[in-house]
Amino acid sequence: MEENLNNIETKTSHKTRNIILIIVGVLVLAAVATLVVLGIMRHKAPNQNDQTAKEDLQELHVFPPIEFADSLYYKKTVVSYEDESPRDVFYYEKDSLGQPTDVRVHETHFYEGEKKYIDGNLSENQRDGLWYAYHKNGNVQTMAHYKNGKENGRYTVYHENGSVYYTGFYEDGKRVGEWKFYDQNENLVRTENFDEKK
């Protein structure tokens, strides 16, 4: 009788132990599966952010043209270099007889050697719309939007190699929101939030 009880206890303890081992095994597998899923999600999130960041940077390399047909306006070189190449050139509206008025509509400034330095439109003698500045190698240095003579909208500065240096937004001549700063390989170096500085 005692031997039978020992056999029953041994069988019960084996069954209990097996059940416990199965439960522990299932819990371990569930934990591992959860960690794997979390790892995949963490791995995917930066890649999606990287992709979005790359798309944002690609968009900053699209340079819309300045709407300006210089043949419709009177062109006047205001300042020249010693070699008589233009430094500052202004464009004025013409009247009904084709004569120049005092309404300036566009400016172009040059480096020595007639390489463009700054270019943009004016409205009521103030910067208006899209303006560009250029590095001496011809690459865009700055792309800025103006309204009533003040920066308004996207403002982007580029390294000499053409990669984005920093970008953000202006409102009425003041930096607003998040600005991003990049190295020459367009790796994000830092961000600054100008709304927090108010």
Image (cartoon, rainbow, N blue to C red):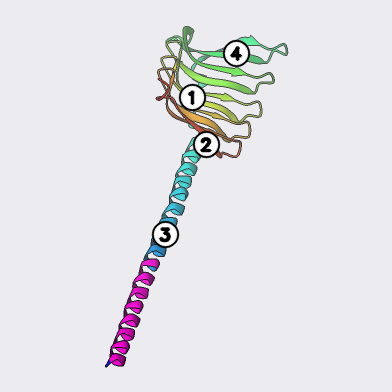
Q: Quadrant of residue 19?
A: bottom left
Q: Is residue 17 magenta?
A: yes
- Which of these two is toward me, 57 or 67? 57
Which mark's residue is nearer the viewer, 3 or 2?
3
Residue at coordinates 46% horizontally, 39% vertically from top-left? Answer: 56
Residue bearing the label numbered 3: 35
- Which of these two is toward me, 163 or 131? 163
Q: Secondary structure at mark 4?
A: strand
Q: Which residues are magenta?
A: 2-28
Residue bearing the label numbered 4: 88
Query: What's the residue type where badge 2 is placed?
Result: His
Query: Marks 3/2: CA distance?
Result: 40 Å
Query: What's the residue type where badge 4 is placed?
Result: Asp
Residue at coordinates 56% horizontally, 39% vertically from top-left? Answer: 186
Query: What's the residue type where badge 3 is placed?
Result: Leu
Which mark's residue is nearer the viewer, 1 or 3?
3
Residue bearing the label numbered 1: 144
Query: What's the residue type where badge 1 is placed?
Result: Ala
